[in-house]
Image (cartoon, rainbow, N blue to C red):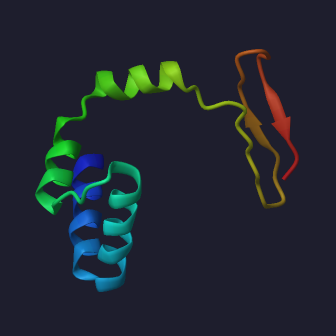
Amino acid sequence: RAKTDLKSRVIMQGESSSARASSIVNDWWHLSRVRSLQEIKDSIDRVTADDIARHLGEYPVSPVTVVTLGPKELKLKSESDDSATLNA
């Protein structure tokens, strides 16, 4: 589902002149070339669950900040603690 969503966004982005121009400039700046929409879609298709796990192993998401809004407390379990309570 994530791949389909991402590819849909890429295709829709290609329909907008300003968004496509921004993507072209970004490609040129970072890659010194411009990728076609097909190349971008193919790159998305090649990503595997193992690729994502490897990336998260190399670049862990830390620290994580949670912001809540509301009258009730949000109870979370953390690795360092059996439970944590956030005041909402």
| Quadrant hosting residue 65 | top right
16 or 85: nearer the viewer? 16
54 or 18: nearer the viewer? 18
- At which x and y percent is residue 7? 22, 57
Q: Residue furthest right?
A: 87
| Quadrant hosting residue 50 | top left
Instruction: Please state if 60 lies on the left or on the right of 65 as rendered.
Output: left
Query: Up-down: is 76 above or below 72?
Result: above
Instruction: Please state if 69 lies on the left or on the right of 43 as rendered.
Output: right
Q: Does any portion of residue 1 appear in the rendered image?
A: no
Query: Up-down: is 80 above or below 60?
Result: above
Query: Up-down: is 16 above or below 80?
Result: below
Instruction: Please state if 52 lies on the left or on the right of 43 as rendered.
Output: right
Number of numbered markers: 0
Instruction: Please state if 58 lies on the left or on the right of 7 as rendered.
Output: right
Residue occupying image coordinates x 36% and y 83%: 18
69 or 40: nearer the viewer? 40
16 or 1: nearer the viewer? 16
Residue occupying image coordinates x 11% and y 57%: 38
- At which x and y percent is residue 85? 84, 35
| Quadrant hosting residue 48 | top left
- At which x and y percent is residue 46? 18, 36
Q: Does any portion of residue 41 appear in the rendered image?
A: yes
Q: Residue furthest bottom?
A: 17
